Image (cartoon, grey):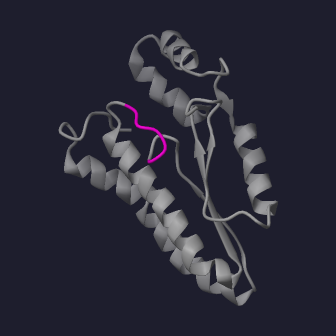
Amino acid sequence: MYSGTLLEMFNENLNKTLNLNVIPMADLAKAVLPGIIDSGGGVMLNMSSVVSSIKGVPNRAAYSIPKAAVTGLTKSIAADYTAKGIRCNAICPGTVDSPSFQERLKPAGDYEQARQDLIARQPMGRIGTTQEIAELVIYLASSSFTTGQAYSIDGGWTI
């Protein structure tokens, strides 16, 4: 993951994160939408982040810009296809203990201190779990009156 401000960001880094986070998601949506429409509707869930249009975080421009685009893609799909029976929402996690999270802490030098620093910024005093994200996925997949929303699941980080 690339860090830095907009002025420090290389366009190649932004292009890489757009090509990782947005373009494949849009391509996948284009590929599956006809089948979902033909089957009478369904649910699409996109993975974004609270570090996007929801919360600005210093030195994360190349990360937050594509994640904000995912939220825009989600709202666009919902606006265009809700009448065809498609519900589309975005899941926007905060800090979640995952393999990628653990990999991002390693270059910090002091892994435990970096972890404690991230925990300290969490109002709930802990980092989220993948199980908690899965629970939101289940809820959104089954909630028949929810579409076009970006759901923060961040332990209160964006309060």
Viewer-side residue, 94 vs 1: 94
Viewer-side residue, 93 vs 159: 159
Q: Is residue 88 above or below residue 130?
A: below
Q: Position of residue 108 (x, y in %)?
A: 40, 18
- Where residue 152 sits, quadrant-wise, is top right
Residue furthest to the front: 159
Q: Position of residue 96 (x, y in %)?
A: 61, 33
Q: Is residue 147 left or right of residue 47?
A: right
What's drawn in magenta, residue-wise? Answer: 53-57
Instruction: Name which residue lies at 66% across and 20% down.
Output: 126
Quarter that holds the C terminus = top right
Quarter that holds the N terminus = top left
Q: Is residue 92 left or right of residue 53?
A: right
Q: Position of residue 132 (x, y in %)?
A: 74, 38
Determine if the magenta segment contains residue 118.
Answer: no
Q: Position of residue 98 (x, y in %)?
A: 61, 34
Viewer-side residue, 62 vs 1: 62
